[in-house]
Each structure stands twice: as C-alpha cells, then as structure tokens.
Image: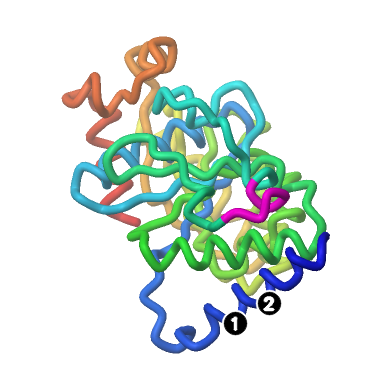
Amino acid sequence: MSNDQAANLRELMNKTKPEEEESTDGKLYAFVGREGSGNTTIVSNISNLMAKEGKKIIIIDFNSGILTTDIFFNVIPNRNMKDIIDGDRSEKEMLLRARDNVYIVYANKVLDLSKEEKELFRAKVDILRKDADLIFADIEGVENLGKLMFFLKDAESIFVTDTDSESIQETYYGIKYLSTNMDLDSARIIVNKSDSVELSDRIIDKLGKTADKFLGIKVEKIGYICREKEVKDSMRKQKLFTDIYPDLRSTSEIVAVKDRL
C-alpha cells in the first residue's frame, strides 16, 4: 500500500468519525448463499422493486462466477474496487449505474486485498452509505465470510438457501461461522426454488431446531420463492423476472420478502 493510500485512509476514516453518533447511513444487508442458490437473482430483483419505489440502492457484488448482477442489469463491469483503490480515485467512481436508482460496485477482487486496503474500501463504502437508502451485498459462498468479516461487522446477514441438502448444510455452516465470530443471536432465511410452502417450512424448521440446539441461534423465515419455469426463463433472457413477469407468483413472493426487510 502506498503512502498516498495510507494518507487517504486516515483522511477518510477521520471524515466519518464526527457523524457516527447521528448517523443516517443507508442500512446494510448482506445476502449470503451457496453458488447456484439464487442469491444474485433475489438481490437483483429486490433492488429493482425498491428502486421503483424511489429508493436509492447500491449493490456490492462480491461474486466472480458466471451469473452476476451485470447479466440482469445488462451492464459492463468495466471497473472493480481493486482498480479504484490502486488508482486512488474517489468513492463515487466505484459506482456503476445500472438503471434509475440502482448502482453497482463490483468488488470480487476485494477478497484478495491487504488489511489496509480493506479498511480503505470500507471507509469509501461508509461514505457512499450516506447517500443511499439501502446497500445490498451479494456474497456467494460461506468460504468467503472469513475474508469479509471487516465488512459484515454492522450488516444484517440474510441467508439464501435452495432446497438442495448441500445448500441447506452450507447455510447452517454460515450461521455457525457468524455466530462464532460475531454477536449473532438470530438468523434470517430465504428459501429459494421451493416446490411448496410446506417444503420451505420444513427446511426452516430443521435449520431452526439444529441452530437452536447447537448454537443457541433463533432462525426466522422472511420468505420463500417458488420454483417456476418463468424465473429460469428470465435468467436465460438475461432479464429481471419482476420486470417481464409482474404477475408471476414469484414476483409477489419477492414483494413479500422486500416488505419484511
């Protein structure tokens, strides 16, 4: 890390301190899910709905897989947070406009930053929060939580699981990791790709009993998204299903999840 970067870090950290007690920063949510769980689909569609309500949303995309937010919003991720830090640019240059009221920060390279660079990244995000209603972090893979603890310290974590046993198990490991490393007394869950309400309730019940018994953690279901071919079709079309299928059952379920945040 250069001397200029270190100086910028100190300046940014000092800039945020005077307002800490009266902070009106946008709330920070971290959506955590196994690859393929539908985490990005849910984050993108909730952001779309909230943006239509006039809220300014910033998505921080920590993923490096094939299906990331650039697909749904048809944007070119031509900048990454690592590039911004290396180039010593302003925090607003982190933002890539996806559509009205939706901005994206591509941050998969943040996982490989030094401790000092992560602190600089966090300071820049804190400044952006002052001009946003909500910030959604899209985190793929429980194995990345350790590298992102600096970011998760004041985020509300929401776990996304599908009905696959491996996804459910990884969700439990994520709850366990955060309960061990943070002051976590409850976990909020979204069940995705569910064939029925009954199935999603059984998954939540199983996770809840296990987390309560071994971790002392309460589990709360904040919603489920049913399995519908139109959702998969929207992904093939590289569109948001809340845009092209406004009357879809999954759309109404996304609305319900949004209203519970």
Please name the amino acid that badge 1 sits on: Asn
The residue depicted at 72 percent of the width and 46 percent of the height is 144
Residue 133, compared with residue 113, is above or below; it is below
- Check whether the beta carbons of the residues at disc 1 and disc 2 lie within 8 A of each other: yes
Please state if 141 lies on the left or on the right of 203 as rendered.
Answer: right
Look at the image and tell me whether residue 205 can be seen.
no
Please state if 144 lies on the left or on the right of 238 as rendered.
Answer: right
Position of the N terminus by quadrant: bottom right
The residue depicted at 43 percent of the width and 28 percent of the height is 194
Is residue 87 found inside the magenta-colored segment of the image? yes
Q: Residue 244's image quarter?
A: top left
Query: Badge 1: how crowded within 10 Å, few (<14), some, or many (20+)?
Result: few
Main structural element of the magenta stretch: helix, strand or loop? helix
Viewer-nearest residue: 137 or 160 = 137
Look at the image and tell me whether residue 230 can be seen.
yes
- Report the magenta residues as a range: 84-89
Please name the amino acid that badge 2 sits on: Arg
